[in-house]
Amino acid sequence: MRLEGKIAAITGGTAGIGRAIAEAYLAEGASVALMARNPEKGAKTLEEMGADDRGLFIAGDAMVQTDVEGFIDKAADHFGQVDILVNNAGGAGDLQPMVDLSDKAFDEAMKWNVYGTFYATRRALRGMIDRKWGRVINISSMEGKHGKPIFTAYTAAKHAINGMTKSLAREVGEVGVTANCICPGLVITDIIKNNGPDTAEAMGMTFDEMIAMFSQESAIKRPNTVEEIAAMALLLASDEGAGITGAMLSVDGGTAQY
């Protein structure tokens, strides 16, 4: 029960990596507030996880400032505080070579990934600083460490999240608040299954060929699992993770290797 009595707020919390983290936190005694766009899916997720009175779902869009800030406020009002913030919402969006990338697509990549992370973190920080304990965990990507053709906007967004996290760690380390990024490699989530064929087509290959290529780039020659990402998020959220801050922690099967 490493997180007993702690309150975690997780954006994009009803599927994939976000859900796996929520399940890991619940198993270790935390209460969880989840934000995603679909209210029906949110209620179903809490029921399936058996969260009962330790679960709260709030519908919202990570690209909308009032939704994100309202999520943090409502979670704090409901549970009394927010101790752990997991900024998981985000995605690759429109994949185009830079020469063809529209202003709108670039702006949306920033709103979805960077702005939402900034809004939620800024809102949750004051309470963490006042209580002298807090955890900010940002789900970045291996694209936050290197570049990839046609992923220009996504790569820029994830690099921005990494830089923001490093600066935040320096600002709040002395008061007991840590800030870290987890940089996953390929993880076969629902969004990958749904959007992957279009991504593969943009890369000039089939979906299976894309998965094989990404897997081959890693040392373990397979995709990571959501449970492997959640295990890192659990360490960072716990007291055992107090000495880790400002880190860009790869859970990518040895793809980036730094």
Image (tube, rainbow, N blue to C red):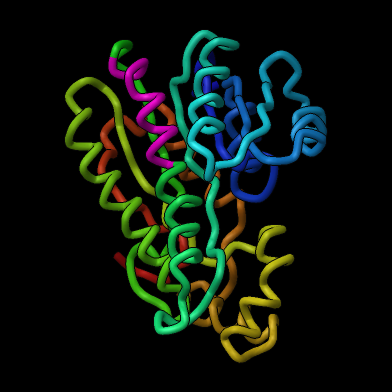
> From this viewpoint, which residue is outermost toward the bottom?
204
Residue 191 image point, x, y percent: 67, 60
For residue 156, above or below residue 22: below
What residue span does the magenta drawing correspond to? 117-129
For residue 123, above or below residue 234: above
128 in the magenta segment: yes
Quarter placement of the N terminus: top right
Q: Is residue 53 left or right of residue 245?
A: right
Q: Is residue 99 left or right of residue 189?
A: left
Q: Main secondary structure of the magenta part?
A: helix
Quarter placement of the C terminus: bottom left
Residue 132 image point, x, y percent: 28, 15
Q: Is residue 244 left or right of residue 33?
A: left
Tell me which corner region of the image, top left, top right, bottom left or bottom right, holds residue 255.
Answer: bottom left
| Closer to the camera in the image, 90 or 232 | 90
| Closer to the camera in the image, 213 or 29 | 213
Residue 123 image point, x, y percent: 40, 25
12 in the magenta segment: no
Q: Residue at x 67, y 22 (%)?
A: 56
For residue 6, above or below residue 213: above
Q: Residue at x 39, y 58 (%)?
A: 158
| Closer to the camera in the image, 11 or 209 | 11
| Closer to the camera in the image, 13 or 113 | 113
Q: Residue at x 61, y 82 (%)?
A: 210
Number of labelled discs?
0
Residue 34 image point, x, y percent: 63, 31
Tell me which corner region of the image, top left, top right, bottom left or bottom right, holds residue 135.
Answer: top left
Tell me which corner region of the image, top left, top right, bottom left or bottom right, holds residue 103.
Answer: bottom left
Q: Residue at x 63, y 43 (%)?
A: 20
